[in-house]
Amino acid sequence: MDQYKSDQSSGFSANKRIGKKPIIQSLRLTATAVLATLAMAACTGHVDKQHAANSLPIAIKAPAIGTPMSATVMPMKANGYVEEEYFLQGQANRYRIKDPMKNAEQIDSGNPYETRVLVRRPANPAKFNGTVIVEWLNVTLDQDIDFVYGATRELLVRDGYAWIGVSAQRNGIEAMKKWNPERYRALNVAASNIDPKDGSQVDPANPRIMAVGGDVLAWDIFSQVGQLAASNQSPMMGGLKVKKLIAGAESQSTLKVSTYYNSIQPLHHVYDGFLFYDRTGQLRTDVQAKTMAIGTEIFTALMGYPPQADTDHQRWWEVNGASHFSLDEIQNYVDPFIKRDAAFRNTEGKPLSLSELTNQKGPCTPATIYSRVPNGDVMKAALKSLNTWVSGGAAPVNAPRFIVDEHNKYVRDVNGQVLGGIRTASQDAPIAKNAGIGSGAWFCGPSGNHVDFTPKQFCERYGNHDAYVSRVKAIVNANVQGGFLLPEEAQKTVNEAKAQPFSCPVSH
């Protein structure tokens, strides 16, 4: 960040720093690829042919000024992967969505934009499994956060997926421009938010999901990124031959992508599948793209109604004891890059992680936020099942749902646990008391919490360490058999149980 501060104070613009010539050369270098892309668009089975041919953006490598904001902290090279940032220049349609359960109406076209995407892909094309996850990056915190990638990261590199993170919304773009104005100065996804037909707002703010509104180009940008990846000609894919596209989203972004699924997907048919992390809005059942939605305890409470019934192409899984995001993905993935990027600081200017920021804005009670229930382990099983499904294989299993009463309130047992849902070892052979919904201001509620057991509590619950490990093994084996856990995560869970340090006095 010291380099960023000195660059910022110098007053150089991005064009002054790198010069206009490299940008022009980049445009020329991509021209051939773009022409080929336009030709290929007519052949792809993923997209509406006319829309694809008229709307593919140009991908340009981001300028070498600083580093990408929200870059992964996962070691890419060690996993045989590369991460690259591209700027996409294109023209987008605006859409009128008066009824989110019906097809959108096009308002106009030709609205210029420039956004960025982060691309993570196998360095060796032979390791690519043919599927690209295109994630609508979450901007609730006014910074792009790749929650879907963070939850599924081990599976993605293990099985050879490619991943694209899309900066679709204005507040994510504005955060980047503030963070490094020289690198990101050219980005702009703004257009008029006024519908010429009746003067209403095209994309109104939605305080319930902390959406600022005005993201009128986001729908078409999300289509175009998928179309560009599927064209098999874009430089951003490094020569990978794309067979399937899966859209991914978390929290606020799931509700945005729910609207996309209902109103935009039927127009252009870009995505083969949709992976929703923490529920969805109401989904149409006549859109044939396959969906998997993973729900935690907060979302039925927030939405006020349970998810709809499964169909022949839609699945909803709910995870007992799960908070909106789990301890693993925050502690081991999101917190490190949030603190590294230092977009959030305390009054003394010290960088804050998401956990530190949440407790500061709370305070949360208890301060040990996030449930230990591993959302990501269930997410990985869901993604693998979805990829099999969209590739012509078996459908994912149906899962038990949370039990609610006639007022859509959770039914709980004597210990306060919600009844129903997928039961993991972290909840049914726990090392802590987990809460899917927390107490306190700001993000304390969705963050949930955990309170680790003392050695005495371990012994009272399990009797001895061997009994604890046996209990964990039984649960993970049942989860694998049920289709809710992959063998790799099952073995990891057992290994963690074996390494859990506690011993109990021998009774005589």
Image (cartoon, rainbow, N blue to C red):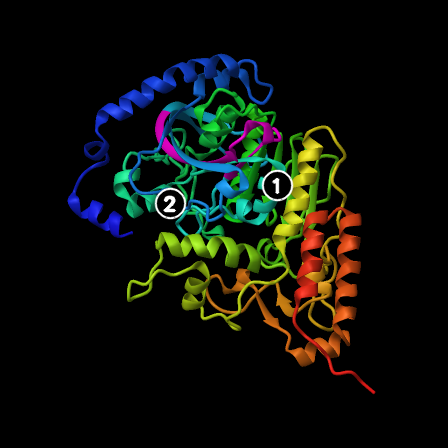
Q: CA distance from mark 1 to mark 2?
A: 25 Å
Chain-order first, disc 1 or disc 2: 2
Picture quadrant of residue 110: top left
Q: Mark 1–mark 2 contact, CB under 8 Å?
A: no
Q: Where residue 381 sits: x, y (%)?
A: 68, 45
Q: For the point 29% across and 21% down, which residue is it?
A: 25
Q: Amino acid at mark 2?
A: Met
Determine which residue is flagged by label 2.
Answer: 69
Q: Where residue 303 sits: x, y (%)?
A: 59, 53
Instruction: Rate crowding at label 2 as few (under 14), some (14 to 19) or many (20 or more) other CA atoms within 10 Å.
Output: many
The label number, if any, that marks residue 158 in the structure image: 1
Q: For the point 52% across and 56% down, which residue is it?
A: 332
Residue range highlighted in magenta? 111-135
Vertical placement of 161 versus 10: above or below?
Answer: above
Q: For the point 64% across and 31% down, which residue is it?
A: 289
The label number, if any, that marks residue 241 in the structure image: none
- Total number of numbered discs in the rendering: 2
Q: Amino acid at mark 1?
A: Arg
Q: Residue furthest bottom?
A: 508
Q: Is residue 347 left or right of residue 70?
A: left
Predominant SS along the magenta part: strand
Q: For the point 61% across and 55% down, which residue is it?
A: 304
Asked whether residue 410 is in view, the answer is no
Residue mark closest to the camera, 1 vs 2? 1
Let me know if residue 132 is in the magenta part.
yes
